[in-house]
Amino acid sequence: MKKVYILIFTLSLFPVSAQNTGADSLLRTLNRTTDMSLKTELLNKISDAYKSSDPDAMQKYAGKALVSARKIHNEKEEAKAFQNLGTSYIILGNYDDAIKYFNLSEKILSGLDQNDKAIKEILAKVFGSKGIMYSEQNNYAKALENDFKAMKLYEATDNKVQLSKIYNNIGVIYDSIDDDIKALNYYLKAYKIQKEIKDPALAVSCSNIGLIYLTENNLVKARKFFDESLKEFQKSPNARGMGELYNSISQYYVAKKDLKTAKNYLLKAEEICKSTEDQFGLSNTYLFLARIYFDENDLDQSSDFVNKSLQISRDLDLPEAMMNCEKLLSEISDKKGNKEQAFIHLKKYNAAKERLSRAENAKERLKAELNFEFEKKQIEKKEKADWEKAKWIFGFLLLTTILIGIFFFYRNREREKTLLLQKQLAEFQHKALHLQMNPHFVFNCLAAISSFIVQNDKEDAIKYLAKFSKLMRLTLDFSQESLVTIDKEIEALKNYLELEQLRFNQKFDFKIFKDPLIEDDTALPSLLLQPYVENAVIHGVVPRKEKGLITISFNQTKEFLICEIEDNGTGIETSKKMKENSMSVHKSMAMEISKKRLETWEELEKKKVSMTIVELKDKNGASKGTRVLLKLPLEYIKD
């Protein structure tokens, strides 16, 4: 479901009459005055008054204000005129011109008295408007940067109305990248102010907050905020917001197993979404209705609604909605006994899921980058405060000041180096996750499972689907941890190799040994060994004519965990001479990333790590396989 931005400048959702009472009154005043300063102010106010009805008129009067302000050298009004021009171009969807005028306004304001409250207000409005513009372009990093600048200025001027809007918009950005904790924090800040000042936007904030609590399965708090949102919408009607709220409330009743009430709310939502032409909301409504009818075993009704949702989702290009629709259509076809149609929808579901996975990975990368930048700025801010304090206290002692400066210099350099290494390690870990399950492997596994379903071999289908699900769950769990226990690693490798055996028709056997002296809480870096094991499968045993064997062993010395991966395949040197294909390119990238992770981990932890890959040969010098040997410093999972 979508969240609602509360704009720094109010935009009407529908065309309104060209007649603008506020602008007309200002125009009459303008025609009666001869004072150039007052005329310039009035022209900017007239421009601002047209923002909800006529962006062309807004540009016209902003242009006149700009000319007038330059004639009388009034930089504050000149900055206002640029700000109004930027706003008009956002409304018209011309972001290039909008940012040009906002930057001109910001440049002028930065050279004026920063203690002047009016200057702070105009500058905050510029930053807030830029935040909206970047949010519309999905450039969340720049949107947050500008929103935080606006937030600090509005906090300084104690402008509660605009501050509540900025808090909401920051919450929407964090919500868009699935950072629910930060999103909820800013929504609640906006809610607190809106409740205090009786802001009509309170209904929207309550709806957004309730939806996050519903996502977290906190039904009591979700119901509390949904009820409050309903009351506020009755005071300040907003048809689109009401439609989204009805959709959200329906899912509350679904969670409470009250499908009849859920259906009633969805029918209300459908009526509103149709009247407001809210296609996004209507897509959700139809999908929710389809699920309810499916649960009630009314497959025809379910199929009708899910197809409506799918059509809208395709028109709006909504990958998550398309994925959910195809999944439900596959389940409906399966229940009707149409296995062939179920398989077709399952393939479409897998394609949509893969596309959504790429989008989710992009969100995770963005979230990590935003967190890294935020933490870095917090560190820099703290250090700057510490430095200022030290300068005031010890400024008169030159020698002490120099020593403190040297101390901070070296400490900062080490800290920045550590932060850089941690960022690199996180990036390599993310890339390792992205490459962990290559698309050919995932597709073939799903195709094999689907084949079992079509052939009505439910026992094997369930068995291999369970293995595949378990492997994917472990892989995702690993992505959250820098270290995993050895038993979890062995479990993941076992699941992976069993699936590869299915994929290649039992082309190879495998054995995994663990030294009984190794403690259960012994750990190793997550997502590290799988690329080498996959390499043994793809480039080692699979090309052999005879049945292959892969042996994985874990041993321990006083200081090291020794991981050995050995296969009786074609050998690394022979494999290099074979023609590279897309799968080998994938794996070479994964192995290179694993190598860089080891190097970065070694430098960060100040512990020795070694990795060797050798080709095994018989007494005649012929290749008989490859051995990968990893020596990792002993690590343990801390409680």
Image: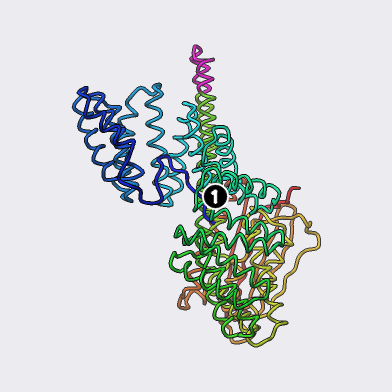
The residue that appears at 18% across and 27% down in the rendered structure is 71
> Residue 226 vs residue 236: left or right?
right
* Residue 183 seen in this snapshot: yes
The quarter of the rendered structure image containing the N terminus is bottom right
Name the residue furthest right. 516
Q: Is mark 1 on a helix, strand or loop?
A: helix
| Magenta region | 388-404
* Residue 587 seen in this snapshot: no
Name the residue nearer the viewer: 552 or 255: 255
Residue 191 spot, x, y in % from top left: 57, 39
Locate residue 477: give its quadrant. Answer: bottom right
The residue that appears at 41% across and 42% down in the rendered structure is 10
Residue 595 spot, x, y in % from top left: 55, 58
In the depicted structure, whether residue 427 falls above or below residue 287: above
Name the residue beneath numbered marker 1: 175
Q: How crowded is mark 1: few (under 14 residues within 10 Å), some or many (20 or more)?
A: many
The residue that appears at 51% across and 33% down in the rendered structure is 380
In the depicted structure, whether residue 365 falls above or below residue 567: above
